Amino acid sequence: MNRTDRLLAIMLELRTCDFCRAEDLAEKFETCKRTIYRDMQALSESGVPLMAVPGKGYSLIEGYFLPPVHLKPEEAMTLLLGSGYIEQNLDREFQQHARTAQEKLEAVLPASQQEEVIRFKETVRFLPGTFFPKAQAYTDYENKLISLRVAIMEKRAVSFGYRKKFEQNHLQSGRRTVHPYGLVNISGIWYLLAYCLLRKDIRHFRLERMDELRCEAETFEKPDGFELQKYIPDQDRPLSIHVVFDTSVQDRVLESRYFYLHTHKVKADGLHVTLRVRQVEEVFHWLLSWGSKVKVIEPESLADRIREEAAAMLGIRQKR
């Protein structure tokens, strides 16, 4: 920790305690008491109102706020919730930044707001969006997230093997080289938004389907005017599928927040849903999982495939 960061951290520590002894500060910031004494002198000379009491330590004079933060409890809670989400869904470096940001924000709030914020924190909790049963699987995923974040910041191309759903039970795989523009989190799942050198267009890549990720020496520049927060993708899912779900499962369907769900409307005969896909294989097994609770209206070719698959399953059961 450099001296500037330590001075700020010392002031935040003083904000949360009545008195702080030099030896306690030295232990916390892994330095010696002589350095803490010099830091205190520097803070005093810069205008920070310090009070030193023999046997007790240092304290900030009552009424001094660092910095003068004027936030409503709801505004402070919004920032704390945001940092909580980052702590649960980004990599280890930003998890640490999120924790220290929460500590700093809580430390500079007036006592009355701190009490209000504590009550708010007891009402909301974030859990990690993606679950990995094996520690190694989580580490690999996190490492990809870190590598991509660095590549985006440094404007460096990346390459990776990518597994993509293809025909029925088969997967299409191949190596891609892309210019990474940003990371997008959809319902707890991370996607890379990047310009694909193979497709000559902007594409989305799901992190879980990436293998052997490498940062390349090649650098790039984003197109003029490109802003991740304002980017609206072209309709790259041209195929429309119309299905009707039984009313008994319509709530479950909507709660699933299925990625390919485009529009929905409740009618007398059930929940009418439009799915937008590149190819029917992307939703085939999902539709099949609903059994008799879903009916494919169009395209007719998909309805035929569903019937064929159901007949095949029935045939296997009868053989047993």
Image: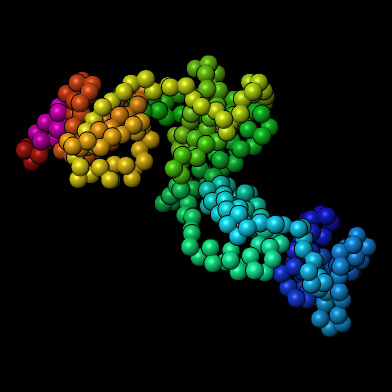
Residue sticking out furthest to the left: 318
Residue drawn 48% across and 28% down?
204
Applied colour scheme: rainbow
Residue 129: x and y in percent read 46, 48
Give the quarter of the figure containing the C terminus. Answer: top left
Q: Main secondary structure of the magenta part?
A: helix
As drawn, 62 above or below 8: below
- Asked if residue 71 lies left or right of residue 204, the reply is right
In the rendered structure, which segment of residues is drawn in magenta? 307-315
Q: Is residue 312 rendered magenta in the image?
A: yes
Residue drawn 89% across and 69% down?
37
Question: Relative to the observer, which residue lies in front, 5 or 133?
Answer: 5
Residue sticking out furthest to the bottom: 55
- Asked if residue 77 lies left or right of residue 36, the reply is left
Residue drawn 50% across and 65% down?
122
- Asked if residue 17 lies left or right of residue 166, the reply is right
As drawn, 226 above or below 124: above
Q: Quadrant of residue 245?
A: top left
Question: Relative to the observer, which residue lies in front, 218 or 26?
Answer: 26
Residue sticking out furthest to the right: 45
As drawn, 210 above or below 4: above
Q: Is residue 309 rendered magenta in the image?
A: yes
Residue 74: x and y in percent read 58, 57
Give the quarter of the figure containing the N terminus. Answer: bottom right
Residue 254: x and y in percent read 32, 42
Residue 288 visible to an observer of this rendering: no
As drawn, 69 above or below 31: above
Question: Relative to the observer, which residue lies in front, 219 or 216?
Answer: 219
Q: Quadrant of residue 223?
A: top right
